[in-house]
Amino acid sequence: MELNNILPADGAKHAKRRVGRGIGSGLGKTAGRGHKGQKSRSGGFHKVGFEGGQMPLQRRLPKRGFKSLATPFKAEVRLGDLETLPVAEIDMLALKQAGLVPELARVVRVIKAGELTKKVTVKGLIATKGAKAAIEAAGGSVA
């Protein structure tokens, strides 16, 4: 192989569309823009969602819902996940190192889902009533 013999793959290159160059090109006269109207003119453009002056769809529909900006900083952990951890004292750092909560998490809530049989001490985390009862029933504590 030599540099002067290298060619692009078949079909990788194709001729540029030359508009307004006669009837034989298939793109003569109106140059593929159809007849009349705003979109056929040079500079004829409108913003995304513009419907010719009609009230646009995104303004006709009612506003709905809310997306909290605090979401990425909150996380939940199940009791079953605490069971799998090899440590007896569970805090935010232990959960992050185990990959159970994202690095961005600032507030972690322990929820009652799954079983907890071993004794664990939960520090610096929020626990629901049911989760707290389950942890204490297993001989652990929530601080």
Image (cartoon, rainbow, N blue to C red):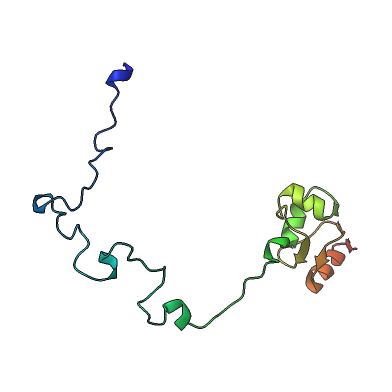
Number of marks present in the image shown: 0
Figure check: 64 above or below 75: below
Q: Quadrant of the C terminus?
A: bottom right
Figure check: 53 above or below 111: below
Which residue lies at the image location 82% right of the left edge and 56% below the top edge?
A: 118
Image quarter for residue 132? bottom right
Extreme residue in the left direction: 24
Residue 64 spot, x, y in % from top left: 55, 80
Q: Viewer-proximal residue, 129 or 136?
A: 129
Figure check: 85 above or below 134: above
Q: Viewer-proximal residue, 4 or 143?
A: 4
- Tell me: 130 left or right of 31: right
Residue 135 spot, x, y in % from top left: 83, 64
Extreme residue in the top direction: 2
Q: Viewer-proximal residue, 70 or 53?
A: 53
Which residue lies at the image location 24% right of the left edge and 40% below the top edge?
A: 14
Q: Quadrant of the N terminus?
A: top left
Which residue lies at the image location 15% right of the left edge and 50% below the top edge?
A: 21
Residue 42 spot, x, y in % from top left: 29, 62
- Tell me: 57 left or right of 29: right
Which residue lies at the image location 29% right of the left edge and 31% below the top edge?
A: 8
Q: Viewer-proximal residue, 73 or 116?
A: 73
Figure check: 129 above or below 2: below
Image quarter for residue 126? bottom right
Residue 63 spot, x, y in % from top left: 54, 81
